[in-house]
Amino acid sequence: MPSAWTTRATRSPSTAPSTPDPGASTMQIDPDVLEAIRTATVDGRALRLKGQLDRKLYERVNLALHAVGGVWHRYKKAHIFTIDAADAIAGLLATGEVITDVDRGYYPTPEPTVERLLALAELEAGCEVLEPSAGRGAIAEAAAARGAVVDCVELDAARAQHIRADGYARQVTNADFFTVPVERRYQRVIMNPPFAGRQDIRHVERALRFLHPGGLLVAIMHGSLTYRGDRRTKDFLARIWEARGTLWELPADAFPAVGAPTVIAVIPVRDVAPPAVLRQIALKPEDFTPRPSAVQQDLFFADEPTTHGTAQLDGFGYGAPHDGRDHSH
């Protein structure tokens, strides 16, 4: 397979190869590839290469453009980006390097795994759903297709714009998820968070704060969650247990790009809120008196037998027949 670059590794020797590392490597673009991109014509989101390139050179150029979000459109005869093409290739031209999605720790959720997530989420039409770290919206788009109202948070500007362009999300926030103000409004959070450095736990713990009481979080997490012995992992597992949540093991090939075991965590928020249309009334001492008023006393006390032959209403023998005997026992 042709390569448009050479790899310059920056991974620490102590980093396990099965753990995704956002800063794993940078890709140095070959000079002839860089020159072909530099001389291309840019028109909005379209980039058109100059002249007819040698096939092998074109394949390497196409690989580099694809790494920064460009997709070849055969009818427009151009590479189309989700943002302005000039912005998409600016970093590549300035540094001669490209950081791919895998290097950033971005692993799109495969369709079979999306289906498993949505099945566990038990979505209903009109359900408000948040997808943090939404990537290009594989989960959000499928949730919206089932009638959910979906909001997305995505750090990468190009991927966030990709979701906006498709139009299925109500709101797309281009930001670091940890800078987004907490708003406890969602019935579901469905997510595929970053795994590196135990980030999956941090992201899930924060995402739980966005759930309305009675809501449900469904998240893909690193499979080592089930056997790590550190304090943070044990505390997190205890939280799942206390919420009566569940862990589901995914097939070994669920994430081929990750090369590591994965699980789905299902965590309910158990404190149930009262119906929004009702207001709780709190009784205070000043709202009532310990002794009945005079009119209330008149209902329970009488000086003589009633016309129906029952005992006088003395508060103790109410309703007892008047036969001259004590029926209070």
Image: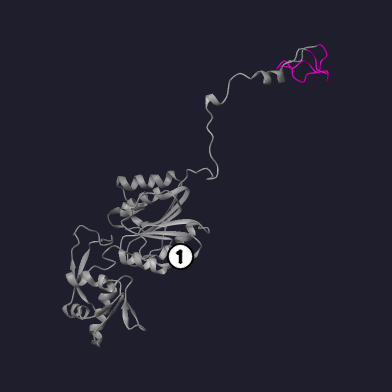
Which element type, helix, strand or loop, lies under badge 1? helix
Q: Position of residue 270 (x, y in %)?
A: 47, 45
Which is more toward the observer, 273 or 170? 170
Q: Position of residue 248 (x, y in %)?
A: 43, 56
Q: Where on the picture, by quarter, is residue 311?
A: top right
> Magenta residues: mostly which secondary structure?
loop
The answer to whether residue 115 is visible is: no
- For the C terminus, the quadrant is top right
Which is more toward the observer, 243 or 311? 311
Which is more toward the observer, 305 or 288? 288
The outermost residue toward the front is 295
Count residues near mark 1 (Cα–Cα under 10 Å), then give few for <14, some for 14-19, many for 20+.
some
Residue indicated by mark 1: 142
Q: Position of residue 263 (x, y in %)?
A: 39, 57
* Residue beneath the point at 24% across and 67% down: 99
Q: Could you tell whether 240 is left or right of 101 in the image?
A: right
> What amino acid is found at the position of numbered circle 1 in the picture?
Ala
Magenta highlight on residue 317: yes
- Name above or below for residue 299 compared with residue 22: above
Magenta highlight on residue 87: no
* Residue beneath the point at 24% across and 79% down: 61
- Name above or below for residue 304 compared with residue 107: above
Span colored in magenta: 304-324
- For the N terminus, the quadrant is bottom left
Q: Could you tell whether 34 is left or right of 320 in the image?
A: left
